[in-house]
Amino acid sequence: MLRTDSPTGAVAVPTTLGGRAARPNQAAIRRFLRSSPLGAAAAALLLIIIFAAIFAKQLAPYDPYTNDYGAMRRAPTAAHRLGTDNLGRDVLTRIIYGLRISLVVSIASVVLGVSIGMCWGVTSGYIGGRYDMFSQRLIEVLTSFPTLILALLLSVSLGPGLRTVIIALAITQVPLATRITRSVVLSVKELAFVEAARCIGATPARIMWRQVAPQCLAPILVIATLNLGAAIFAEAALSFLGVGIPPPTPSLGNMLGGVLAQSFKPPWWLVVFPGVMIALAVLAANLLGDALRDFLDPKLGKQIRDV
Amino acid sequence: MQRYILRRLLTAIPTIFGITVLIFIAMRVLPGDPIAQITSESSGQYTLSADELAAARASLGLDRPLPQQYLAWMADVFRGNLGHSFWNTEPIRAVVLRRGMISLEIAILAVALSWLIGVPAGIISATRRNSWLDNVLRLFMAIFLAVPSFWIGLSAVLFLVLVFTWRPPLSLIQLWQDPVKNLQIVIGPSIALGIGLAAGLARMTRSTMLEVLHEDYVRTARAKGVRERIVLARHVFRNALLPIVTTSGAAMGGLIGGTVATETAFGVPGLGNYLVQALSQRDWMVIQNLVLIYGLIFVAINLIVDLSYAWIDPRIRYQ
């Protein structure tokens, strides 16, 4: 399962994610945690955030949708630790629920976008020819939009809502994942074990799935983690601009939308706390991504940059 | 070099064609048509009769077959005619020119700022690797890469309002009308965007500098007694410049998107703000043409980056 001739220098971790190994490779994880304390801290922070999002119902002190007109725009107190918003809803509660939405959106979009990108990259790189040419042009068109503009265009054409944001953000992630995968595939498909598989009569589909695709897992894992931060970021921006998650559903972005416009003397806690939460979540994802990249392959950084 | 430029220009043509098709499809085919969207959203207040709907469609050319609509749009764009907004009669081109100046100022200032802060920070960080200064700088880089620029904008405005009871002017004032007022408008967004860009640039500068520092020619230069300052300036930085330029160019994409959110946070009447307004009003003609403009700007930036890449590194020209 573990290939030492991997051009990406894939080590133990990716093989555990190949779907065939039932148990995670604990030794590799332990090695990763020891080699990068910062990465371990980031992973811990991300786990805490995910935990908070999953158990939002148990952790949040109030209901995120119940308006309390007797306690509108209260500064942080013992009853409302992070204050209340314009409708008297508890900010801490809404941040925890908002975290849930942000994570659902970012994780779903990363899984969707990166897997599409990976399939596309593997087929494009392996099959080559006209299909590859056409794919490359299409990818080029997709990358010719600034990410946020593309996401804006897609979400306005699909209409607002959770599913739209996920699809829009997923599409913005496809090009990079495709390019990275394709570049790995181009070098892998010339290697001896691929040729060997071809010689014993394996079909192209089988070679792509069993021989080539596993080699791309290491870079894809790194891209996915780094994209996670970018997706949290993008969701916040889209919702802030009013084309992402529509209120009253709380999201970290839409909590920030319109805060300054709504009053002459804006309540500071409505601006500060959701923003800090976005920054923490993005920071954790970014640091983990960097640490994973350094751990899995230092050369990868250059590769991601160059493609 | 000329052949390279020509080749690169030719490859941009299919990309631009693809962009226009993608925008066109996104705006027409997916959700029904613009009129359907507008009427469905205002259906509570008034309803258009079937005749009125047909008339509205005809006036916008929506009753024609799609390829014809596409060609008509392209013909208009080539003539420099961007049409007019659904809600008022001012030509979009005039609005774009007026508001675009503000956004351009913000973008230029932000990039300048990112170079002024990011590159020196990256160099310092790389040359004093693992010192406390390096660690502090890296901490700042990580933080500013994670903080959304629109949130910096919101916080800055909030701070100004609460502490000085002053906020930047919300009106549109051009540089040649009143430079001081104009600066008050653009400085905030430029700083908010510039910090994030600087963080990315500093990181890239640091990592490429570190890479180049290990090259043989650097060791050779040092061995023959060249002063460290000269080694860094001539041998290391010059060779590290390539990825820095690329990052800067790639970051422009983020910058273009970033201006949209940051302008909204500051309430600056730039191009990005116009787009957001159009999005909330479902003003599809404005959206369609603005997205096209953003796409074209991005393609142009990529083109310039590629050309400067070839200019800096002769090896690329002859591939």
Image (spheres, coloured by chain):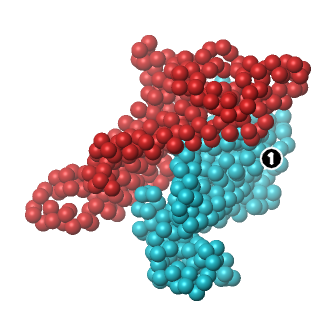
Chain colours: A cyan, B red
Q: Quadrant of residue A16?
A: bottom right
What residue lies at 64% left-to-right and 57% top-to-bottom? A113
Between residue B84 and residue A45, name the one nearer to us: B84
Where residue B33 appears, x then y in whole percent? 77, 32
Q: Is residue A296 left or right of residue B304?
A: right
Q: Is residue B134 left or right of residue A93?
A: left
Compared with residue A132, is residue A213 higher up or lower down, i.e. above or below?
below
Secondary structure, mark 1, is: loop
Where residue B198 appears, x then y in whole percent? 41, 45
Quarter that holds the N terminus of chain A: bottom right
Q: Quadrant of residue B44?
A: top right
Q: Amino acid at mark 1?
A: Pro
Q: Is residue A86 left or right of residue B222?
A: right
What residue lies at 48% left-to-right and 64% top-to-bottom? A183
Quarter that holds the C terminus of chain A: bottom left
Asked whether residue B23 appears in the rendered view, the answer is yes
Between residue A199 and residue A300, name the one nearer to us: A199
What residue lies at 46% left-to-right and 60% top-to-bottom? A304
Reading the image, the residue beneath label 1 is A64
Q: Chain of mark 1?
A: A
